[in-house]
Image: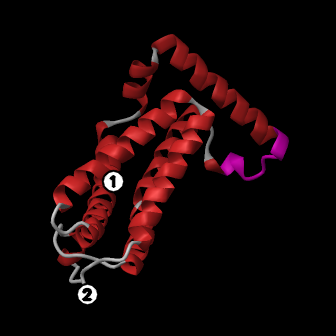
Amino acid sequence: MKRFFSFNGTISGSSFILRTLFSIVLSIPFLVLSFALFFSIFFNYMDIDFASVEGMSMAESNALGEKVGLKIAEDLIQLGAAEWFSQNVSILWITLIIISLVPFFWFTLATYYKRISAIFLSNRVKAFFTLIALGVTLDIIGLKYGNTIFWICQLIGLAIFGFLLLKNSPIGEHDG
């Protein structure tokens, strides 16, 4: 198991796609914890118990959801975002969410490093950090400048992913 998370060795394009799909599986704990945090905040604002929710009609639940949304918005305006966040999210939640992201990021970075090592064997470290910098730059530009630029940046990122996936490696036997 340790070799899958290490930053040595190389992988083929097919291993790259499989490892990328597995990294999606590694993001599931983050998603579960995020939804649990959201729903715990939401249910704290509802001031009802689960037994009374069972017989609730759709119109009643929609009205309750709107009421909770208004309460949250009023608290955000009244307290400010930082104060509201500190009152509703504990350090335990933040710690758990960050810890749930560590295996995902580590595995994903190891996957990209192994594939870049297979393609750019002599300049793998420079190529890896260039890829990271390019990805972050494309994300920042795409988010900052709007809809059309966002999609252009996403297409460039997809082209880079396709290059990493389809480029033949000069290495015959991969050991990662």
Give the amino acid type for the residue marked by disc 2 in the picture. Answer: Gly
Q: Secondary structure at mark 1?
A: helix
Please report whichever mark, 2 or 1, sits nearer to the chain's N-terminal start: 1
Query: In front here: 155 or 77?
Result: 155
For image coordinates 35% across by 45% down, the residue present is: 134
For image coordinates 24% across by 56% down, the residue present is: 127
Q: Is residue 68 left or right of residue 118?
A: right
Q: Of the numbered discs in the image, which one, if any, rests on residue 101?
A: 1
* Number of marks: 2
For image coordinates 21% across by 83% down, the residue present is: 175
For image coordinates 45% across by 33% down, the residue present is: 141
For disc 2, the marked residue is 172
Query: In front here: 106 or 74?
Result: 106
Nearer the viewer's eye, disc 2 or disc 1?
2
Relative image position of residue 6 (x, y in whole percent): 18, 69
Q: Give how far apart the Cα atoms at labels 2 and 1 are.
A: 33 Å
Q: Residues within 10 Å of mark 2 (few under 14, many from 20)?
A: few
Q: Which residues are magenta?
A: 51-59
